[in-house]
């Protein structure tokens, strides 16, 4: 971890950038010097997230293409994901709405964890990170329930009882890959929360909580697009 | 911009709580579009509007992009813009394929999906 000390020195030292905006942008890219005035871990997380953006975009654009190109009718998401409680009439899309709220709640607790991390409030940071992980695990649990329901209906990657065959392959591919990201995020959060609790970052600083937060917010961000394009449109 | 210059992102708690509530409200609106069965151009407009607002607030405030220096912000937001071109091309390609399926393979593009039995 010798990198962090060199970056910290250049970040907080006299070479800290003076200008903002376009002038700052040109200054940052000019000459042989460090471009990004953030900890190296944060810059690398952003590079990873930009590449991940392209992966999810490929899935969503692929979904758009098969949905446009099929002449068969697309199944009605609002009916497929409806759920009835205690024998009530099925409420349209309710499970997905609850999942969306769970994920947004987890994003909020994560944002607060980052804030308390920078205040060096170790206890609150750990509690909020664990709450975020718990909400993430809840989300994955609900997704497993959703999958089992659709498998029960006879939705397969190669066909379903209602319309275009591609519905199943798109559904399992996109929600599966997103669920994998959430699962990875839960594990990542718990590892970092444990290290925060053990005091590994007291000297190094709490940037790691923000970096973990970036990943978590990204997972929520991807869900915003999946929710809109796959479930609502 | 002292926060960005020192590499730390420390902001008042209030702004996170406000954005958090706003995201709840916007999600509620998105769900209402489906619940009240809004269709056609209005559905697309509302869903995409709420989506863009939610994504924007998560990126800008929760992920701190609005407080980052322009060099980093453009590294994040610039490259994905090329995806608009991909979306454009694939939409043309998809339309062509559908047209070919209807015209040459006798597919019927006007059937309605079957309803779901719960």
Image (cartoon, coloured by chain):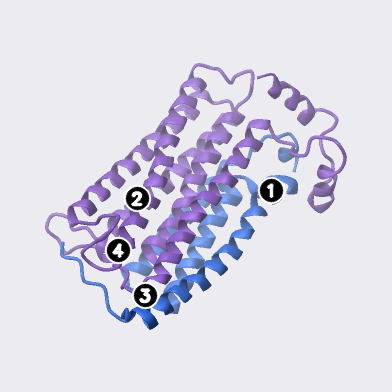
Chain colours: A purple, B blue
Which dot, 1 or 4, sits closer to the camera?
Answer: 4
In the image, taking residue A72 as reference, residue A126 lies left or right, namely right
Question: Of helix, strand and loop, which one carries label 1?
Answer: helix
Q: Which image quarter is the N terminus of chain B in?
A: top right
Taking the image as shown, residue B20 lies to the left or right of residue A144, namely: right
- Provide the chain ID for the residue under circle 2: A
Same chain under badges 4 and 3? The reply is no
**Residue A157 percent across, percent down from the top left:** 30, 55
Residue A48 lies, with reference to residue A39, above or below; the image says below
Mark 4 falls within which chain?
A
Gap in angstroms between the C-alphas marked 3 and 1: 37 Å
Judging depth in this view, the residue of B53 and B93 nearest the camera is B93
Within 10 angstroms of label 1, few (less than 14), some, or many (20 or more) residues? some
Report how far apart the C-alphas of labels 1 and 2 lie in the structure.
Answer: 31 Å
- The outermost residue toward the front is B104
Question: Which marked residue is nearer to the observer: mark 4 or mark 3?
Answer: 4
Q: Can residue A97 be seen in this view?
A: no
Cβ–Cβ under 8 Å for marks 4 and 3: no
Cβ atoms under marks 3 and 1 closer than 8 Å: no
In the rendered structure, the residue with mark 3 lies on which chain? Answer: B
Mark number displayed over residue B75:
1
Write down the residue under mark 2.
Answer: A99
Q: Which residue is drawn at 39% across and 37% down?
A: A183
Across and down, in percent, residue B64 comes to: 62, 45
Residue position for label 4: A165
Residue at figure coordinates x 84%, y 45% from the top left = A19
**Same-subunit check for callouts 3 and 1:** yes
Name the mark on residue B38: 3
Secondary element at tag 2: helix
Determine the CA span between mark 3 and mark 2: 21 Å
């Amino acid at each position: 971890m010798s990198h962090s000390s060199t970056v910290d020195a250049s970040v907080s030292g006299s070479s800290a950038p003076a200008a903002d905006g376009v002038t700052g942008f040109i200054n940052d890219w000019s000459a042989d010097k460090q471009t990004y005035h953030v900890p190296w871990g944060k810059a690398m997380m952003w590079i990873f997230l930009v590449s991940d953006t392209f992966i999810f975009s490929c899935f969503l654009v692929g979904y758009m293409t098969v949905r446009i190109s099929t002449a068969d009718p697309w199944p009605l998401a609002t009916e497929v994901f409806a759920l009835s409680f205690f024998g009530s009439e099925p409420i349209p899309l309710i499970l997905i709405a609850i999942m969306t709220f769970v994920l947004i709640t987890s994003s909020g607790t994560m944002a607060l964890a980052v804030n308390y991390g920078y205040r060096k409030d170790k206890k609150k940071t750990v509690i909020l990170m664990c709450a975020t992980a718990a909400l993430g695990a809840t989300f994955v649990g609900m997704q497993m329930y959703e999958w089992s329901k659709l498998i029960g209906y006879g939705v397969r990657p190669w066909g379903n009882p209602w319309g275009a065959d591609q519905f199943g392959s798109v559904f399992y591919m996109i929600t599966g890959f997103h669920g994998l990201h959430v699962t990875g995020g839960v594990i990542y959060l718990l590892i970092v929360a444990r290290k925060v609790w053990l005091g590994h970052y007291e000297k190094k600083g709490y940037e790691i909580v923000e970096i973990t937060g970036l990943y978590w917010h990204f997972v929520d961000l991807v869900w915003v697009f999946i929710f809109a394009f796959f479930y609502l449109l | 911009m002292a926060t960005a210059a020192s590499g730390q992102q420390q902001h008042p708690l209030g702004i996170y709580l406000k954005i958090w509530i706003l995201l709840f409200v916007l999600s509620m609106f998105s769900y209402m579009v489906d619940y009240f069965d809004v269709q056609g151009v209005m559905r697309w407009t509302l869903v995409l509007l709420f989506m863009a607002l939610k994504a924007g607030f998560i990126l800008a405030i929760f992920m701190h992009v609005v407080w980052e220096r322009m060099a980093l912000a453009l590294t994040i937001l610039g490259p994905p813009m090329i995806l608009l071109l991909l979306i454009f091309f694939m939409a043309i390609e998809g339309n062509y394929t559908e047209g070919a399926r209807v015209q040459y393979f006798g597919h019927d593009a006007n059937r309605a999906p079957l309803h779901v039995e719960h």
